[in-house]
Image: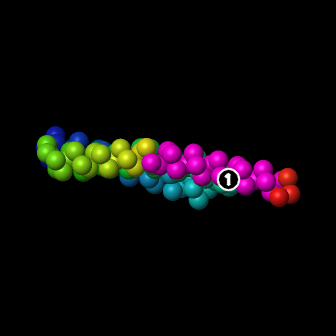
Amino acid sequence: MTPHHVVVMVLLWAGVGCMLLSAAALLRLQGTLMRLHALAPASVAGVPLIAAAVAVGQGLGRAAVKTLFIGLLFALGGTVTAIAVGRAARQGEAEGRDGG
């Protein structure tokens, strides 16, 4: 097993671990905002770590840069989406308490 392969496997399993922890927390937690927080490790760390593992496995080149860019988009897009969903959920809860 080469050091290159070890780096790929460490990155890959770290990303998979983040995804599994996020899924377990999603099943365990109650409430919209708590579940939304449970998704953060998956979108901010899990997908970018898996993308980094794929990019390292691909070696230097355009394909690796594209893969890293996709991982970055997932990290940023997941954060922005979580903020938007959290605001909408909070606003919906506030309107429900006010009666409409």
Instruction: Give x and y (percent) for residue 60.
Output: 13, 43
Instruction: Give x and y (percent) for residue 59.
Output: 14, 45
Q: Tally the numbered discs.
A: 1
Instruction: Give x and y (percent) for residue 1.
Output: 14, 47
26 shown above or below 49: below
Could you tell me which residue is drawn at 72 percent across and 50 percent down?
91
Residue 95 appears in view: yes
Could you tell me which residue is drawn at 24 percent across and 49 percent down?
66
SS for dot 1: helix
Could you tell me which residue is drawn at 13 percent across and 45 percent down?
61
Crowd rating for badge 1 (residues with CA inside 10 Å; few <14, some 14–19, many 20+): some
Residue 46 appears in view: no
User: Which color scheme does this rendered protein use?
Assistant: rainbow
Question: What type is the residue that disc 1 sits on?
Answer: Ala
Instruction: Tell me, yes or no, whether the highlighted magenta stretch contains residue 98.
Output: no
Residue 29 falls left or right of residue 16: right
Q: Which of 5 and 49 is in front in this view?
A: 49
Mark 1 — residue? 89
Residue 26 falls left or right of residue 43: right
Quadrant in the picture for the C terminus: bottom right
Instruction: Tell me, yes or no, whether the highlighted magenta stretch contains residue 90.
Output: yes
Q: Is the magenta stretch mostly helix, strand or loop?
A: helix
Over which residues does the magenta segment extend?
A: 77-97
Instruction: Give x and y (percent) for residue 57.
Output: 19, 49
Q: Which residue lies furthest to the front in this view?
A: 100
Q: Which of 61 and 34 is in front in this view?
A: 61
Could you tell me which residue is drawn at 65 percent across and 47 percent down?
87
Q: Which of 64 and 27 is in front in this view?
A: 64
